[in-house]
Image: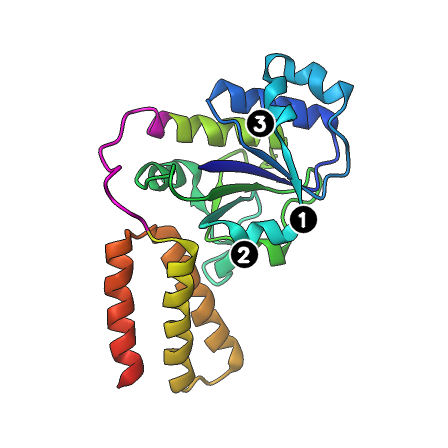
């Protein structure tokens, strides 16, 4: 399942516009993390025929983010190649990745940051991948409801075509955790000139496994290789 997760939303009008966009593209799971506004009259007025999306919306705290098999953040603040956590992928490529897995069996969260400040570095670090929407350098920051509309449109284009991969199982959050535990053990055996370089390796491998969206069979093959390396 795919969930749209909003971090500390402040404006009811944005809630309504996002619900409307979700309805346009056949998404109905909305999660609010520590919302700063209620789902009130203003939100429902903008939502119009998407009030059922608002009525089913769930309210959770930040611990909820750790329950996702894949957490995909959104950002307009791009990092360099050296800023691994903020190394974002074009929204079209993210949509292709999501459409390539059995998203109905996995918990996939699309994480949308605050209206004014987006996602914090800590929240970005929780993500398996970051998506960005190409926009003008003069004014690159989109309103969150506009960003969600574009993101859901790109995903809808990819997943609306019937897929033939329903028989394939894909790696879950637990599978990724196992692979990362092996990575940590391997890194502990290696020497690094600074602690920062070791930490960089951890970040890189987390993103590699997250962006790859491996099948369960592929994940088991990677685990097998890593297990052998740990034992050597």
User: Between marks 3 and 2, how big is the CA–CA gap?
Assistant: 24 Å
> Which segment is the magenta one?
157-170
Indicate whether 194 appears above or below 10: below
The residue indicated by pointer 1 is 61
Mark 3: few/some/many CA within 10 Å (<14, 14-19, 20+): few
Who's the residue at 43% across and 62% down the image? 206
Asked if one can make out residue 133 in the rendered structure from this viewpoint, the answer is no
Secondary element at image label 1: loop
- Which coloring applies here? rainbow
User: Between marks 1 and 2, how big is the CA–CA gap?
Assistant: 14 Å
* Percent coordinates x, y for residue 120 in the rendering: 64, 53
Q: Earlier in the sequence, mark 3 or mark 2?
A: 2
Q: Is residue 167 left or right of residue 54?
A: left
Q: Is residue 161 magenta?
A: yes
The residue indicated by pointer 2 is 126
Q: Are marks 3 and 2 in contact (CB under 8 Å)?
A: no
Q: Earlier in the sequence, mark 1 or mark 3?
A: 1
* Percent coordinates x, y for residue 29 in the rendering: 54, 32
Who's the residue at 76% across and 19% down the image? 42
Q: Is residue 120 left or right of residue 172?
A: right
Q: Is residue 112 magenta?
A: no
Q: Is residue 91 left or right of residue 226?
A: right
């Amino acid at each position: 399942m795919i969930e749209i997760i909003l971090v500390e939303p402040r404006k009811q009008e944005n809630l309504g516009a996002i619900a409307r966009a979700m309805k346009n593209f056949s998404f109905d799971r909305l999660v609010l993390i520590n919302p700063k506004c209620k789902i009130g009259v203003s939100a429902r007025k903008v939502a119009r025929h998407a009030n059922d999306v608002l009525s089913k919306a769930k309210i959770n705290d930040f611990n909820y983010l750790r329950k996702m098999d894949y957490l995909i953040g959104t950002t307009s603040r791009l990092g360099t190649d050296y800023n691994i956590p903020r190394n974002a992928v074009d929204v079209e490529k993210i949509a292709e990745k999501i459409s390539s897995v059995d998203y109905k069996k996995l918990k996939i969260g699309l994480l949308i940051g605050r209206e004014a400040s987006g996602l914090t570095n800590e929240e970005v670090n929780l993500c398996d991948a970051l998506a960005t929407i190409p926009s003008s350098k003069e004014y690159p920051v989109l309103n969150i409801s506009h960003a969600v509309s574009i993101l859901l449109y790109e995903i809808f284009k990819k997943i609306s075509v019937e897929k033939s991969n329903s028989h394939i199982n894909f790696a879950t959050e637990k599978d990724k955790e196992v692979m990362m535990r092996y990575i940590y053990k391997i890194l502990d055996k290696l020497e690094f000139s600074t602690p920062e370089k070791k930490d960089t390796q951890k970040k890189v491998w987390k993103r590699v496994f997250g962006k790859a969206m491996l099948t369960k069979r592929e994940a088991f093959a990677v685990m097998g290789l890593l297990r052998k390396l740990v034992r050597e």
